[in-house]
Image: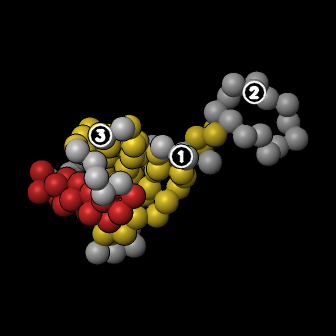
Amino acid sequence: MIDFERESRTPYSEAYTILDDGGIVGRIDIHYQGETVNATLCTTADASEERIQELIDAADERLVMTAYPYREDFVVAVWRGSPAGVYSDDDDDDEEEDEDTFRLN
């Protein structure tokens, strides 16, 4: 079963991790712009066209239509690949580092 775990939310956008049977299968960023909803779907490199459509349909039904039921179009850009990690420039160490250095969390 496809589940969505919200990562962040602003007044006009949301980001979700996509899970299937407890494993991460992708991420979707959704942006609400007037009558059109735009999204970027990132999924695994081996995702088939059928799987991509299944993820888009689930996002539309469970996320977009519940937040903005009167939208005219849902446009999704799809990326296939592999996760490289989450990087941050938040410095938890006492060491002095270049503040523009991003590290894998």
Name of the residue lying farthest toward the right: 94
Crowding at dot 2, Cα within 10 Å, few <14 / some 14-19 / many 20+, comes out as few
Residue at image position (85%, 31%) is: 96
Q: Position of residue 62 (x, y in %)?
A: 32, 65
Quadrant assignment, res 18:
bottom left
Q: Position of residue 89 (x, y in %)?
A: 68, 36
Q: Which mark is residue 29?
A: none
**Which residue is more in the foreground, 58 or 93?**
58
Q: Earlier in the sequence, mark 2 or mark 1?
A: 1
Circle 3 is placed at which residue position?
Answer: 36
Between the C-alphas of marks 3 and 1, the distance is 15 Å
Q: Is residue 3 left or right of residue 12?
A: left
Give amino acid for label 3.
Thr
**Secondary structure type for disc 3:** strand
Circle 1 is placed at which residue position?
Answer: 11
**Secondary structure type for disc 2:** loop
Does any portion of residue 19 appear in the rendered image?
no
**Which residue is more in the foreground, 66 or 100?**
66
